[in-house]
Image (cartoon, rainbow, N blue to C red):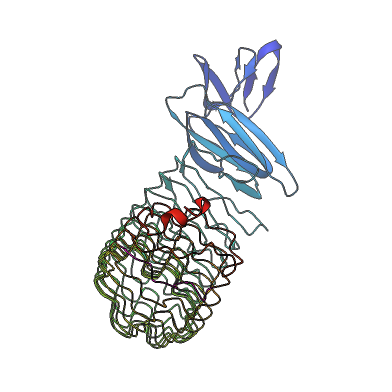
Amino acid sequence: MAVFTGNNNKAKTVSSIYIGQGNKAKEVQAAYVGVNGKAKEVYTSGPPEGFTVVYGGQGTAKVSLIGIGKIYWGDGTSTKYKVTGFSSQQFTHTYQDTSTDYIAIITGSPSYICFGANRLTDAATTLKEVRSALPCVGARTFLQDCFYNCTSLTTVVSNLFVNNPNVTSFYRCFQGCTSLTSIPSGLFDNNTAVTQFDSCFQGCTSLTSIPSGLFDNCTSVPSFSRVFYGCTGITLIPSGLFDNNTAATSFNTCFSNCTSLTSIPSGLFDNNTAATSFNTCFSNCTNLASIPSGLFDNNTAAITFSSCFSGCSSLTTIPSGLFDNNTAVTTFSSCFSGCYSLTTIPSGLFDNNTAVTNFNTCFSNCTSLASIPSGLFDNNTAVTNFNTCFSNCTSLASIPSGLFDNNTAVTNFSRVFYGCNGITSIPSELFDNNTAVTNFDSCFSGCSSLTTIPSGLFDNNTAVTTFSSCFSNCTSLTLIPSGLFDNNTAATTFENCFISCRALTSIPSGLFDNNTAVTNFFGTFWNCNHITSAAPELWDTTKWPSVTSHTYCFKSCTSAANYADIPSDWK
């Protein structure tokens, strides 16, 4: 029995009594007491059974629900909820006293519960702790976004998901929980049906470790994409983390931007024989100093390593044979791009990767790379793209002869040695076998130590359409060989081709005589201010009838022997 003494001389019988203390009502075996005309519910002992969380007093407490029950906010107030159908409803509460935390309890039978942000609601940014297991969400099989962007959440209980064995998705479950300091061991032990962990802990910047065996019982998961992306505090990965996840096919961006990670355990992917993609897996792990030998030995189904180690600026070496067993790979695009400390490439690194078609940006911005091993691409006969492959490798002093001899299908050498300001010469016959190439855009741009171009460099490249910026900013280049472009009759643009080649003193006669299809001579010799020879009469429309762009072609070439004859719109 219990007595409610309320306003308006009304009394009710209940099973507990609340009595007022000051302006707050506290539970002493039962009661409602009127306070300013309103009855408030407060519990200090024997709280109701339900799902328990802690909110900070500052800001607004939020939770989205489907089902029937009651939310006890922990400050003497409560809210009933009754939400049916598929769409949830967000319930909010503002605490009067912002200086303390509040233990809130959700009772009833919610079939959906979410504190995270989604397309309809904002995140519960004041949620600080989860102190009990989530109730069973019944037939619903997803807990995606459950705590998404709960930026104040610091801890969750280890049995948080024990009541939900049928859940299949934890997509973005804890993404953006920047205050979460640890993942409890066994968190997913009862979730054997899960198939989705993408972005689960993405951006949890306060995490410092991953518990061993975290995914041991989650054997059906096909993708671990972005699962720890941006976890900048994690320093190591536990051995055997993915040993039981034999269905996994994707590790895309899995540990990307884990900037405190210093090492990768040997055999991390040994049991993941179905894995096909390691795109950006360890990209921007700026403290990663080494790669274990044989890391991918068992991943024979892998087809892509794009950006896998890009931005790993502390990486100094690549283990020999790293990709020996990955014979199905088709792309190494940006694989080691931005590895500023990398000094060498092991010989034969790609020998077994005969299906590769793309080395785009593979070693770009490897500013400490001192040499390219001879025959590096000898077995990669299917490759079509070397765009930006060695761009800004500023420590490179030379290019090995025959580097591209076996790559006869290549169509794109754009920016391949862009910004390699240590290269002094180009080997003769470098492109002799690359008869399918169409693009030399910016190929040697910014090679400021290059002094000469070998005769006949492009003789066999008859399909080329663009030499735009090919030798731009080669500030030490003193000579252009006669007949350099004689066989490139398909070329349509020489835009900025020799711009700022300030050491040039002459332009060979007839340099472009065979290039009658050209439409663009914009800035071709712009700022070549030491040229004293006559400029070619490219404005002669009987020879070059298709030119539509030519502004600045000879700008600043004021010492050219025929400068006065150059039309004003060409200079």
Residue drawn at (26%, 72%) of the image: 317
Residue 38 visible to the viewer: yes
Front residue (pair 360, 143): 360
Residue 422 horizontal/vertical position (percent): 25, 66
Residue 218 horizontal/vertical position (percent): 50, 68
- Residue 414 included in the magenta stretch of the image: no
Compared with 569, 389 (above or below) is below
Front residue (pair 565, 399): 565
Residue 198 horizontal/vertical position (percent): 52, 61
Residue drawn at (55%, 32%) of the image: 73
Compared with 375, 389 (above or below) is above
Front residue (pair 277, 43): 277
Residue drawn at (66%, 57%) of the image: 140
Find the residue positioned furthest to the right: 85
Quadrant of the rendered structure where residue 457 is?
bottom left
Range of magenta residues: 504-515
- Residue 509 included in the magenta stretch of the image: yes
